[in-house]
Image (tube, grey):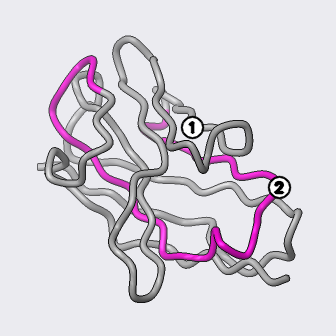
Amino acid sequence: QVQLVESGGGLVQAGGSLRLSCAASGRTLVTYTMGWFRQAPGKEREFVAAINWWRRSTNYADSAKGRFTISKDNSRNTVYLQMNSLKPEDTAVYYCAAYFSPSGDSSRTQDYDYWGQGTQVTVSS
């Protein structure tokens, strides 16, 4: 069992930055792929970025490329999402997720087995 707790959300003006954190516990995450998803009101949950613990390769949604960076701190069992140049359309609840794979990078919600409770990000224009 893996427990995930997100933090770092908040209100920011357009063009600003936020860094989200996802602290994982319960299992070592060496063999897990970690992802960030988001869900805006009235919309489906969508993929943002993923990183695998072993190969350290990453995958980004087109909307995140060039603005967001996913990274991890093995010693703290924590994954981060650095978000720069934020836009009002980035407003959503952001979720951290995990599934068992040492080298995965899936963008599909159905592949992820563990989810955090979400953290709200609001970008004002």
Q: Amino acid at mark 1?
A: Ile
Q: Which mark is residue 70?
A: 1
Q: Position of residue 76 (x, y in %)?
A: 48, 37
Please report the residue visible at 33 percent of the width from the left and 73 percent of the height from the top. 44
Image height of 95 relative to 2, above or below: below
Circle 1 Cα neighbour tier, 10 Å, few/some/many (<14 / 14–19 / ≥20): many
The reply to whether discs 2 and 1 touch (Cβ–Cβ < 8 Å) is no
Q: Residue furthest top?
A: 55
Circle 2 Cα neighbour tier, 10 Å, few/some/many (<14 / 14–19 / ≥20): some
State which quadrant residue 115 falls in.
bottom left
Q: Position of residue 19 (x, y in %)?
A: 68, 55
Q: Amino acid at mark 2?
A: Ser
Image height of 121 relative to 25, above or below: below
Q: Position of residue 71 (x, y in %)?
A: 56, 33
Residue closest to the eye, 48 or 21: 48
Q: Which residue is mark 2?
A: 85
Please report the residue visible at 73 percent of the width from the left and 76 percent of the height from the top. 88
Magenta range: 76-104
Please report the residue visible at 49 percent of the width from the left and 42 percent of the height from the top. 79
- From the viewer's perspective, tell me whether residue 65 is left or right of residue 24: right
- From the viewer's perspective, tell me whether residue 84 is left or right of residue 28: right
Image height of 94 relative to 32, above or below: below
Q: Secondary structure at mark 1?
A: strand
Residue closest to the eye, 3 or 80: 80
What distance separates the C-alpha of mark 2 from that of mark 1? Answer: 15 Å
Of label 2 and label 1, which has the lower sequence position?
Answer: 1
Q: Secondary structure at mark 2?
A: loop
Q: Position of residue 106 (x, y in %)?
A: 28, 35
